[in-house]
Amino acid sequence: MIVNTPPMGWNTWNTFGQNINEQLIRESVDTFIKLGLKDAGYQYFVIDDCWSEHERDPQTDEIVPSKTKFPNGMKAVADYVHENGLKFGMYSCAGVRTCANYPGSYNHEFLDAKTFARWGVDFLKYDYCLRAINGEAPYLYRRMGQALRQCGREILFSACNWGSEDVWSWIRTTGASMYRSTGDIFDNFESAKNIAISQLPKMCYSAPNCFNDMDMLTVGMFGKGNVGRDSTNTIDEYTVQFAAWCLWGSPLMLGCDLRKMTPEILKLVTNRDLIAINQDPLVAQPYCLEPHAMSAGWVPVARFLEGGDLALGLFNFSDNPRECSILLEWLGFPYDSKYRLEMRDLISGETTLSGRDDINGQVPPHSVRIFRCHPVPAC
Ligand code: GLA
């Protein structure tokens, strides 16, 4: 399966955990469409763990959808998702049980892939809990990778082994189109910050056909739900999270209760300029301009974009305001290039001109300034 840009969608886990059912999915699909998320590029609608009965069918050995949560079966849910022009995602696990102790796909990979295909599944998130004793990661993920390739339906393979076993070094051998590179996110600034910083050295391991997945976004949860932990993210902190996921090139899987999304959050997650960076067709590797800046708590990250522009994010992860200074040379424009940059702030919309050889600005604590920069001749 060819996947040119990071997948975008929504997943049940962050907010709903085990509290999922057909009614919730239908309401969330309706809201997804009404909010314009599909128009903004979000596409995959994913049901995470806890969707099945606790045991397989004793006759067929198939996994069975929970009769109380999904009384009409999964095909009916998939049909509803498809009728709304979206793609349907599900969850299983490389172990004998899932992380929440439902049946996993170990030794049932080919059967389960066929079952998913029959229901109309388009995306499979594949977790890593409760593995059998001989269950080495590359081997387990290759099994399901092959099963999906042989199941008769195109199903995007989303690996989730939390960045363990040097996953970046072998994940492309399994046919996965995205891979989780970190442990689970929680809805607080520290968690998003630690994930973003931990991925700075891994940016070269994300490219078309296999993207580094930094986990489902907590943007808009405001402490409510399964990974909520009663946190108090501000809109600035959520902006840092969303901007980092966009610029780093992570898949964008929303995780909040869509039915309760505030207008401010909707504006953020449908910011077309930020999404355009995430989905930029060049898929150039982002890079940290000044690794030592991290010791001062701020991180400048840039990325070349198709057509000659570039993206620049000045992230202040610290608790104090920071003066951020960038030399244009770090972006590939030495003084003698005779270029400076027209910089459009993607949050405020304001456009400014860089200095002749540098960019300086103050960034408040727990905030980001993110720009699309257009090189112009310096007079
Ligand atoms: C693991 C994954 C999470 C979620 C849960 C479900 O922790 O990393 O994203 O899928 O399992 O149990």
Image (cartoon, helix red, strand yellow):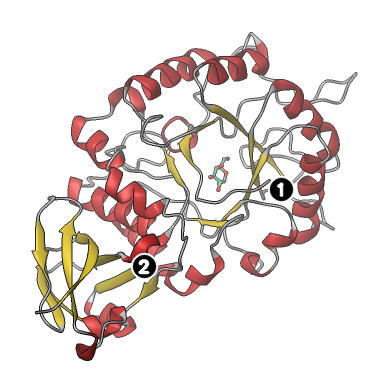
Please identify the residue farthest to the bottom as the structure is shown. Answer: 336
Q: Residues within 10 Å of mark 1 (few under 14, many from 20)?
A: some
Residue 86 vertical placement versus 281 (above, below): above
The image shows residue 239 at horizontal and vertical percentages of 24, 50
For the residue pair 170 and 48, the one nearer the viewer reads as 170
Question: What is the quadrant of residue 113 in the picture?
Answer: top right
Q: Which residue lies at the image location 19% right of the left edge and 36% below the top edge? A: 264
* Label 1 near ligand 1 (CB < 8 Å): no
- Ligand 1, by image quadrant, is top right
If you read the primary sequence from the N terminus, does the residue marked by circle 2 or circle 1 appear first? 1
Q: Which residue is mark 1?
A: 130
Q: Amino acid at mark 2?
A: Arg
Q: Which residue is mark 2?
A: 303
Please identify the residue farthest to the right as the structure is shown. Answer: 59
Asked whether the residues under the numbered discs 2 and 1 touch, taking CB atoms below 8 Å apart as contact, a structural biologist would say no
Q: Which residue lies at the image location 69% right of the left edge and 61% below the top edge? A: 172
Residue 114 vertical placement versus 64 (above, below): below
